[in-house]
Image (cartoon, grey):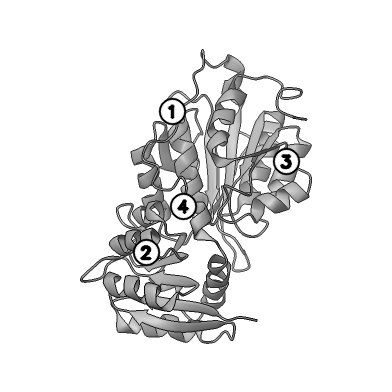
Amino acid sequence: MKQIRVVVADDSAFARELIIAILSTDKDICVVGEAANGLEAINKVAELKPDILTLDIEMPVMNGLEAIEGIMASHAVPILVVTTRGDSNTAYTAISKGALDLVQKPDVNLEGARDFIDKIKMLSKIKVITHMKGRHNKNPKKPLAHSGFSGKALDKVVAIASSTGGPEALSVILPGLPENFPSPVLVAQHISDGFVPGMVEWFGKISRVKIKVAGEGEQITAGTVYVSPSEKHMEIDSSRKVVLKERHPGDLYHPSCDALLSSVSRVYGDRSIGIILSGMGSDGVRGMQNIKKAEGMTIAQDEKSSIVFGMPKVAIDNGCIDLILPLEDICGVMIRLMSLDKYEGVFRGR
């Protein structure tokens, strides 16, 4: 098997040594180069043609954001941001410029080595060139014209499950929602601890609807997007309030997409709309099955527009998806569904 070639870019020699030490424990990975700043990273990628680059944001000479722009414009490779910065002005700007995912430096330790290695292996296989169309979209599609939402729409909810590639997908969907979107939107996005507030701030700057980190006991309301903190699992109880549940050491994904979607199916039944976006693994599939059994509507992002066609594919293969849509069409369908009482014959069976 061909080894995965990695370049590690960080201005801290200690951080580079730690990342290299972790990656060197896996025989399928070979670190072929190091860089101490963004300019060196660009040159190393051009010279060594790695399968993936790990990149810090705050570096001298040229920072990580400038480096991402340069690399994606000339010698595009998958980029994993490894940084101590979790605010929206840095980490999520990196996603918008072409980075695939991000982790905090404290997460790159011997205890979390396996997860870090698995992420490197998964991201290295992504063909970033095919996903550059639509990136840097500064003019997202406007909401579809509509004559108003029916009162029946007020009793619906949209629950979204996403993982790797999810922040970028959400940055396409959420800006298209009108300010008066007549249902709550609940989001479970797999992400490293510490990055959710920055992600929410980033979404808030580009969206019309209100977007916030969900709080314990909060009553969900129409026109608001509630994003689960990564440190807890979010569910909805029978009174339609947020319940944040503790994570357990054995939990593979955080926050849990299955926990959110399953609770929505129990509370909203056939008024549930479940959406599963780009991501690796199978989290969210059981929840989508539960929404399907409750006769709600289920939607999956299609393969062409998914950065990682893992979670959507598993859901599709399990037969629990009503609609398979390109990313750019999902928002419009969400809006249309708000004014429909019954989905049969309108979307299903197309």
Residue denoted by label 1: 142
Residue denoted by label 2: 71
Q: Is residue 118 above or below residue 94?
A: below
- Tell me if mark 2 has few (under 14), some (14-19) or many (20+) residues whose alpha carbon lies within 10 angstroms of its own: many
Q: Nearer the viewer, mark 1 or mark 2?
A: 2
- Tell me if mark 3 has few (under 14), some (14-19) or many (20+) residues whose alpha carbon lies within 10 angstroms of its own: many
Residue denoted by label 4: 132
Residue at 38%, 72% in the rendered image = 46
N-term-proximal mark, 2 vs 3 = 2
N-term-proximal mark, 3 vs 4 = 4
N-term-proximal mark, 3 vs 1 = 1
Q: In this view, does 35 lie to the left or right of 111?
A: left
Q: Which amino acid does label 1 sit on?
A: Lys
Give residue 90's quadrant in the image: bottom left
Alpha carbon distance from label 3 to label 4: 27 Å
Mark 1 element type: loop
Residue denoted by label 3: 321
Q: Nearer the viewer, mark 2 or mark 3?
A: 2
Q: Which of marks 3 and 4 is in front?
A: 4
Q: Nearer the viewer, mark 4 or mark 1?
A: 4
Q: Which amino acid does label 3 sit on?
A: Ile
Q: In this view, does 213 lie above or below 282?
A: above
- Tell me if mark 1 has few (under 14), some (14-19) or many (20+) residues whose alpha carbon lies within 10 angstroms of its own: few
Give residue 2's quadrant in the image: bottom right
Mark 2 element type: helix
Q: Which amino acid does label 4 sit on?
A: Met
Q: Is residue 154 above or below residue 116?
A: above
Q: What residue type is labelled 2?
A: Ile
Quadrant that contains the N terminus: bottom right
- Judge by depth and name the residue closer to the eye, 340 or 51: 51
Residue 179: horizontal and vertical position, in percent? 42, 26
